[in-house]
Amino acid sequence: MAIVDTSRRLQTRTILQDIESYEGYGTVKDYTPRRPEAAPEVLQAHLAAMQAKQQKETEMLAMAKAAADEARQAEWDFHNSVMAMKESVRGLYGPDSHEAQAVGYKKKSERKRPRRRAA
C-alpha cells in the first residue's frame, strides 16, 4: 500500500466524491459494516465535524483578509503622514537645513553636481 501524506489538503473533487459516496451509502439496505469507522453514525459524525471545521476555516480566512486589509490601510496612512511631515519640514526650514537632513532628506549642498562628458 502506498504511503499517504496526510499533511497536504485533499482535492475538492475528492471530497465531493466522498460526499456523493456517503449520500449513496444511505440507499444500501442490507450492508453491515465490518469496520467500526465505516458505521453510519461515525460517517455522519465525521461529515458534520468536517463541515463545521471548513466553516470555521472560511470564517477565519475572511477575518484574516479583513485584518490584512486594515493593516495595509494603516501602513499607507502612516506613510502618507510621514511624507507630509517631511515635506512640511523641508518647506519650513529649507532644503539645505539640518532639520531636513534629520527627517531623511539629503542636504542640497551635499548633492553632487552632474559632470559634463567629453564627446
Image (spheres, rainbow, N blue to C red):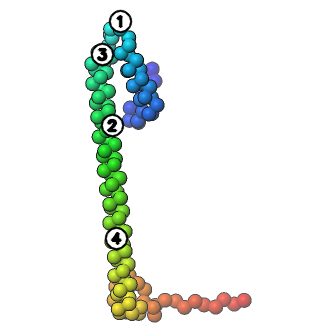
Callouts 4 and 3 close, C-beta under 8 Å: no
Of mark 4 and mark 1, the one earlier in the sequence is 1
For marks 1 and 3, give the CA distance. Answer: 13 Å
Q: Look at the numbered discs 1 and 3 and tell me whether their residues touch, using CB distance below 8 Å.
A: no
CA separation in Å, label 4 and label 1: 67 Å
Label 1 with label 2: CB-CB less than 8 Å: no
Q: Quadrant of residue 98?
A: bottom left
Q: Nearer the viewer, residue 47 or 100?
A: 47
In the picture, the disc for residue 30 is: 1
Q: Is residue 12 left or right of residue 42?
A: right
**Decide: marks 3, 2 in contact (CB < 8 A)?**
no
Q: Looking at the picture, which amino acid does disc 2 mark?
A: Gln
Residue indicated by mark 3:
39
Of mark 1 and mark 3, the one earlier in the sequence is 1
The secondary element bearing badge 3 is classed as loop
Which residue is at 35% across, 64% downward? 73
Mark 4 highlights which residue?
Answer: 77
What residue sits right under mark 2 in the picture?
54
Question: Which secondary structure, mark 2?
Answer: helix
The mark tally for this picture is 4
Give the mark nearest the N terminus, 1 or 2.
Answer: 1
Residue 3 in view here: no
Label 4 close to label 2 by CB (< 8 Å):
no
At label 3, counting other C-alpha atoms closer than 10 Å, the crowd grade (few under 14, some 14-19, many 20 or more) is few
Residue at mark 4 to residue at mark 3: CA–CA distance: 57 Å
> What is the CA distance from the residue labelled 1 to the residue labelled 2?
32 Å
Q: Position of residue 29 (x, y in %)?
A: 35, 8
